[in-house]
Image (cartoon, grey):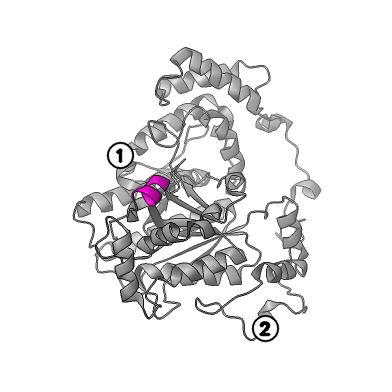
């Protein structure tokens, strides 16, 4: 199903609904889009959906052997680490912020040279070319909020589900890796440590504990970030013109595993509480920003750094606002049912998307679904699932949410977001939540039924 055909179809849609009309075209519009696609002679699903034509070959399909093991041709031996000397054998190596790490790009390349499977995949455009390690964490003590520990458990499960489906590794941390860097600053030390612990990974993705991944099929658009090393949600005008601490949101960021990033994190961290002159720095940051009275946080420090050293760092920083890389929960949670309705409308016509599948190949169906999502968008009247729903200001563990929100709106919103995401996972297991407000009871997903 070529992208040229998709372009022609979108053009047809524009003639029908008009290019100046809102992108949100409703269920009828989805049906019309599907109808146009279905009548295109060059638009067809692969023959895999004709089950009668399928054949099984143990040699080709990796079928189970007599002892129930599964054959694999990946050639990855994680049970062996070559004896060749690498940076890990250097006694001066430190995983900590505040300890210089030099020549990291060369050290990574040397390690990959001694681990050729990772090197071949990273350099040859294989599945590991943009390998990701997700890093997240939470407080080390029990939550004060009565429902806080349950919410944190479900929030972590959500991230584990996404990583399993996408093939990402995940590191969960609930301890301080640096004695001076606590509270909101505690995210930087595990990100730095993850870079050293995972030289095979090209990227580290940080997700705050109160982040929900609400599109399990979403693949990060690495092609957009090829010339960049740091991706963060925000708006350039709020940073560089308004000098607002809200110009960026550090709850989610993607950072490349390279020397530039090591240096960037060290510089960012130097504006925090590990610096003995932190109190004086806070006053400087407060005087620079226009809307932050007590700038002791890592987000204000990052905006300050971008303002003061834009020439040094700015070229490699991608400020993302083209999709919900860090979606604001209050603008999202009431729209989940409408999004589910639109996705079911797609599946009602596209029988291939209704097919039962193994979770390990669910990403294939996500790529197929993209054909039907080209005419819409994430947010701004569109009906594409948001990648991230971030419950900023809700504080699920302490319960000390921003007073502009009601506590129940935070907790109910989280339950809806988690169940919305969970439905996407559970369909691979044959179930679906009865409603987004009910976390306890599930119903079987009927055969050939839209998810």
Mainly helix, strand or loop, the magenta region? Answer: helix
Q: Give the image location of residue 276, x and y in percent.
A: 38, 81
- Work out whether residue 296 can be spotted: no
Q: Which mark is residue 391?
A: none
Q: Give the image location of residue 47, x and y in percent.
A: 70, 29
Q: Which segment is the magenta one? A: 236-242
For the point 54% across and 80% down, which residue is it? 99
Q: Which mark is residue 90?
A: 2
For the point 68% across and 52% down, which residue is it? 127
Q: Is 4 or 411 nearer to us in this picture?
A: 4
The image quadrant that residue 208 belongs to is: bottom left
Residue 35 position (above or below residue 167) = above
Question: Which comes sooner in the sequence, label 2 or label 1?
Answer: 2
Q: Would residue 215 appear left or right of 106 to someone viewing this image?
A: left
Q: Would residue 374 appear left or right of 328 to someone viewing this image?
A: right
Which residue is farthest top? 16
Tally of marks: 2
Q: Which mark is residue 334?
A: 1
Which residue is farthest right? 59
For the point 29% across and 48% down, which residue is it? 413
- Work out whether residue 378 can be spotted: yes
């Amino acid at each position: 199903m070529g992208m040229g055909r998709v372009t022609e179809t979108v053009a047809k849609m524009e003639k029908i609904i008009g290019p100046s009309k809102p992108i949100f075209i409703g269920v009828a519009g989805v049906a019309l889009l599907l109808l146009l696609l279905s009548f295109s002679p060059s638009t067809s699903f692969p023959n895999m959906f004709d089950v009668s034509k399928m054949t099984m070959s143990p040699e080709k399909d990796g079928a189970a052997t007599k002892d129930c093991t599964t054959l694999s041709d990946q050639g990855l031996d994680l049970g062996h680490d070559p004896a060749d000397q690498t940076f890990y054998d250097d006694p001066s190596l430190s995983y900590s912020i505040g300890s210089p790490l030099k020549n990291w790009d060369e050290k990574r390349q040397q390690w990959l040279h001694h681990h050729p499977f990772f090197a071949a995949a990273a350099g040859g455009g294989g599945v590991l070319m943009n390998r990701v390690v997700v890093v997240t964490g939470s407080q080390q003590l029990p939550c004060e909020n009565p429902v806080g520990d349950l919410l944190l458990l479900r929030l972590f499960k959500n991230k584990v589900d996404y990583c399993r489906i996408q093939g990402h590794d995940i590191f969960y941390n609930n301890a301080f890796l640096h004695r001076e860097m606590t509270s909101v600053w505690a995210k930087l030390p595990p990100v730095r440590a993850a870079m050293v612990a995972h030289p095979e990974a090209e990227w580290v993705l940080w997700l705050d504990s109160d982040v929900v991944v609400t599109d399990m099929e979403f693949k990060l658009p690495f092609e957009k970030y090829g010339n960049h090393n740091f991706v963060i949600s925000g708006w350039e005008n709020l940073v560089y013109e308004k000098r607002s601490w809200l110009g960026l949101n550090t709850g989610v960021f993607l950072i490349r595993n390279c020397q530039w990033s090591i240096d960037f994190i060290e510089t960012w961290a130097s504006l925090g509480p590990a610096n003995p002159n932190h109190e004086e720095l806070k006053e400087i940051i407060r005087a620079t920003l226009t809307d932050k009275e007590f700038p002791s946080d890592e987000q204000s420090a990052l905006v300050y750094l971008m303002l003061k050293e834009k020439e040094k760092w700015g070229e490699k920083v991608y400020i993302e606002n083209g999709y919900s890389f860090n979606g604001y929960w209050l603008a999202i949670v009431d729209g989940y049912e409408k999004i589910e309705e639109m996705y079911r409308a797609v599946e009602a016509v596209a029988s291939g998307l209704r097919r039962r599948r193994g979770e390990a190949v669910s990403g294939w169906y996500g790529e197929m679904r993209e054909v039907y999502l080209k005419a819409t968008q994430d947010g701004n009247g569109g009906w594409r699932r948001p990648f991230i729903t971030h419950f900023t200001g809700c504080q699920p563990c302490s319960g000390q949410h921003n007073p502009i929100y009601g506590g129940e709106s935070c907790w109910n919103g989280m339950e809806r977001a988690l169940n919305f995401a969970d439905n996407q996972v559970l369909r691979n297991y044959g179930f679906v939540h009865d409603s987004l407000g009910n976390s306890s009871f599930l119903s079987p997903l009927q055969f050939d039924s839209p998810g």
